[in-house]
Amino acid sequence: MIVFIFIMASDNWLGVELRHFAALQAIASEGSFGRAAERLGYTQSAVSQQIARLERIVGEKLVERPGGPRPVSLTEAGQLLLRHADSIVARLQAAQADLQALRAGEAGTLRIGTFQSAGARVLPEIMRRFTTQWPQIEVMLEEHDDEEIADALERGELDVGFVLLPIGDAPLATVELLRDPYVLVVAAGSPLAEEPPSLAEIARQPLVGFRAGASTVPIEAAFRAARLEPRWAFRSNDNQTVQGLVAAGMGCAIVPLLTVDTSDPRIVAVDLRGSVEPRVVGIGRHRDRYASPAARAFIETALAAEAGNRRLEAPTRR
């Protein structure tokens, strides 16, 4: 009650509307009032009026208007308010998703986020079990880069997602699903396949690998701890591209085992356990949002499926 009275008494902030924040977000993204208006489906004068109203309410200039062909930009105050606006809009989107999940009950749609290797190697068995038990649920699958899934869960765009742990400051409830060891992938016939090489030996080879992301963190940490500087020949976030280039002799690759098609006769996967810490694959949801029965059931199904799966404990080929 005290907070409400303070807001009422200070600068009429209760006059701030969602359309004001939408206009601020659109201008920050588009760099002009005209393009912001097109994006929102408003007239340019309407967007200008909304920004002017927002500036009067908060008592600060929020947008620099240089005139002519130069793009408009946010002031320091505008950038500060935009960060809060993004959070408020994200929370409202999450609230909308919660209400939809509550109305749906044991029917409706379940939105699941996955990354490449989890989608290819982990998800199929979970989906087979889940769709048998929950045939009335429409499952919508979305593939993201692994570091993007936590953000999508936070914004309410996904109900459940496969994530790499730990996930930092995102407000997620997560549980570990499996540990995915790193292996050295080399072309068939490579002398490096005869016996597991040291990190120093690997660092002298041209390396093919992923671009910066959560999956590269353990690799970079291992090289850094050994005071080694790897030689990167090529980076791609596509698992098949990495494996194909290794098979073609462009270099070797340190990658999680889940990303490797070990049935490919062109390559050999060499066990590196002890040299690089495994990545931890988890499954999570927003901890503050309503979890539908279907979302809870999907997480339970994933845990049950992986509890009986010893795939990642078998030694890799040498």
Image: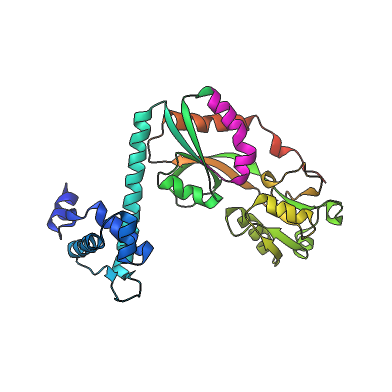
Splitting the image into 4 quarters, where does residue 98 fall?
A: top left
Q: Report the front residue among 77 and 170.
A: 77
When the figure is inspected, residue 16 is found, relative to residue 101, above or below; the finding is below
Relative side of 109 to 19, left or right: right
Q: Report the front residue among 233 and 283.
A: 233
> Can residue 311 be seen by looking at this rendering?
yes
The answer to if 305 sits in the magenta stretch is no
In percent of width and height, residue 10 lies at 15, 59
Relative side of 159 to 12, left or right: right
| Magenta region | 113-132
In percent of width and height, residue 199 lies at 75, 59
Q: Report the front residue among 82 and 52.
A: 52
Which secondary structure class fits the magenta region best?
helix
- Tell me the colour scheme of the image: rainbow
> Can residue 226 be seen by looking at this rendering?
no
Residue at 38%, 62% in the rendered image? 29
Residue at 40%, 47% in the rendered image? 155
In this rendering, the count of numbered labels is 0
